[in-house]
């Protein structure tokens, strides 16, 4: 009887260690992607020469490359998501890192609309909120599945409302969308971290499949952070 209890404890410890290693890899790649995005956004946003590649300053409209940069992130996400089983790990990793660079180019436009100090302070605030909710998701013993389903429904609502507001150009609706967006993406952060923690407990580390799950997990958390940052910037950023 004592031997059986000892084996159970060992198995439980191994499971936690496996999940911890998996999550460590997920966060490492997520932080790497955020670093790439931040560096690219900063250099494009503070260089007239680089910005001229994305926007025609004479007419104030994006260039062909600018439009491609704005809409291509959606294509990256679709390719990585639906091609998960067919794409090899090196290709998936390359797409993820390239996606983070393109996102940096896309986010460089915020330097035209907001002051650099407010962008920096909003980034710090986003990091604090993201870190807090990630810790909640990792440590809580409450099953967040139902909560996550509600957050996902809220996400679809935000997408639909944002598409409608593209035609209405309503400042009030944008404020409401941003406020709800902050709530949704903070909630999704906790849900996604718990979901990834559970996935990590059952993967076989060192395999190509596990590596791809790490990248997709990093992608999920990366998008949670970026969207949280954008929503907070819309609410509290100081416009030029």
Image: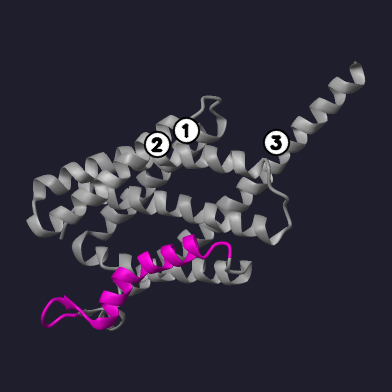
Position in image of residue 37 (x %, y %): 42, 65
Position in image of residue 173 (x %, y %): 13, 46
In the figure, 225 relative to 5: above or below? Answer: below
Q: Check the picture and name the quadrant holding the C terminus.
A: bottom left
Marker disc for residue 16: 3
Residue marked by disc 1 = 145
Determine whether the residue tagged by mark 3 lies in a helix, strand or loop. Answer: helix
Determine whether the residue tagged by mark 1 lies in a helix, strand or loop. Answer: helix
Dividing the picture into quarters, in which one does residue 202 lie?
top right
Question: Crowdedness of circle 1 by 10 Å Cα count: few (<14), some, many (20+)?
Answer: few
Determine whether the residue tagged by mark 2 lies in a helix, strand or loop. Answer: helix
Q: Check the picture and name the quadrant holding the N terminus.
A: top right
- The span picked out in magenta is 56-85
117 with respect to 219 (left or right): left
- Give whichever of discs 3 and 1 has the lower sequence position: 3
Q: CA distance from mark 3 to mark 1?
A: 20 Å
Q: Residue at x 19, y 62 (%)?
A: 113
Closest to the observer: 191 or 238? 191
Closest to the observer: 213 or 226? 213
Residue marked by disc 2 = 149
169 with respect to 79 (left or right): left
Q: Is residue 76 magenta?
A: yes
Question: Crowdedness of circle 3 by 10 Å Cα count: few (<14), some, many (20+)?
Answer: some
- Mark 1 near mark 2, Cβ–Cβ under 8 Å? yes
Q: Nearer the viewer, mark 3 or mark 1?
A: 1
Q: Main secondary structure of the magenta part?
A: helix
- Give whichever of discs 2 and 3 has the lower sequence position: 3
In the figure, 179 relative to 218: above or below? Answer: above
């Amino acid at each position: 009887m004592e031997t059986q209890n000892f084996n159970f404890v060992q198995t439980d410890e191994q499971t936690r260690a496996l999940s911890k290693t998996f999550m460590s890899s997920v966060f490492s790649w997520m932080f790497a992607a955020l670093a790439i995005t931040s560096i690219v956004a900063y250099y494009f946003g503070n260089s007239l020469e680089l910005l001229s590649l994305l926007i025609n300053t004479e007419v104030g409209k994006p260039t062909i490359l600018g439009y491609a940069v704005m809409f291509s992130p959606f294509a990256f996400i679709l390719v990585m998501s639906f091609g998960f089983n067919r794409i090899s790990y090196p290709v998936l990793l390359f797409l993820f890192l390239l996606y983070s660079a393109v996102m940096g180019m896309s986010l460089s436009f915020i330097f035209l609309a907001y002051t650099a100090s407010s962008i920096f302070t909003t980034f710090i605030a986003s990091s604090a909120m993201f870190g807090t909710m990630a810790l909640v998701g990792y440590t809580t013993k409450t099953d967040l599945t139902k909560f996550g389903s509600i957050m996902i429904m809220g996400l679809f609502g935000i997408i639909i409302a944002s598409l409608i507001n593209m035609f209405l150009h309503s400042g009030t609706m944008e404020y409401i969308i941003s406020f709800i967006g902050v709530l949704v993406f903070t909630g999704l952060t906790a849900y996604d971290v718990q979901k990834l923690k559970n996935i990590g407990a059952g993967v076989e580390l060192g395999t190509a499949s596990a590596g791809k799950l790490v990248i997709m997990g990093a992608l999920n958390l990366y998008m949670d952070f970026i969207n949280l940052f954008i929503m907070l910037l819309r609410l509290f950023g100081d416009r030029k």
